[in-house]
């Protein structure tokens, strides 16, 4: 048996249709922005790690090249 109280008998309001279309558009834009942000964070993290490792290796090489002081 079909419950007739849940069947929509009138068309969707034009303002609601416009909101649904805009929501779909914004959702796609949000996915692109999220992807760009993830890429930016990964590149930034890799750059910071590179700089830290480079500085660590320079300090390590500097201490190995120093003559021992007796």
Image: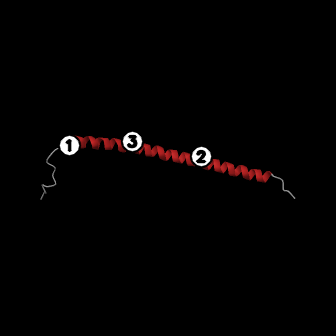
Compare residues 10 and 3 and report the one nearer the observer. 10
In this rendering, position of residue 29 left or right of residue 12: right
For marks 1 and 2, give the CA distance.
51 Å
**Quadrant of image for the N terminus:** bottom left
Q: From the viewer's perspective, is residue 27 above or below residue 1?
A: above
Q: Between tags 1 and 3, which lies in front?
A: 1
Residue found 31% across the figure and 41% down from its top:
22
Residue closest to the far right: 70
What colouring method underlies this structural image?
secondary structure
How packed mark 2 is, by other alpha carbons closer than 10 Å (few <14, some 14-19, many 20 or more), is few
Question: What residue is shown with label 1?
Answer: 13
Residue at 55 percent across and 45 percent down: it is 43
**Horizontal and vertical percent for residue 50?**
62, 48
Depicted 26 relative to depicted 57: above or below? above
The numbered disc on residue 29 is 3
Mark 3, residues whose alpha carbon is within 10 Å: few (<14), some, or many (≥20)? few
Residue 21 appears left or right of 55: left
Q: Secondary structure at mark 1?
A: loop
Tell me the SS state at disc 2.
Answer: helix
- Secondary structure found at label 3: helix
Per the model, the C-alpha gap separating discs 3 and 2 is: 27 Å
Q: Position of residue 31 (x, y in %)?
A: 40, 45
Disc 1 to disc 3, C-alpha distance: 25 Å
In the image, is 60 to the left or to the right of 69? Answer: left
Residue occupying the point 70% across, 51% down: 57
Mark 3 / mark 2, whichever is N-terminal: 3
Q: Nearer the viewer, mark 1 or mark 2?
A: 1
Q: In the rendered image, which residue does mark 2 sit on? A: 47
């Amino acid at each position: 048996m079909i419950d007739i109280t849940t069947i929509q008998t009138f068309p969707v309001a034009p303002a609601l249709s416009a909101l649904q279309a805009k929501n779909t558009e914004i959702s796609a834009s949000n996915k692109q922005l999220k992807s760009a942000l993830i890429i930016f964070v990964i590149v930034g993290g890799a750059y910071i790690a590179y700089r830290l490792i480079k500085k660590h290796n320079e300090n390590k090489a500097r201490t190995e090249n120093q003559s021992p002081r007796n």
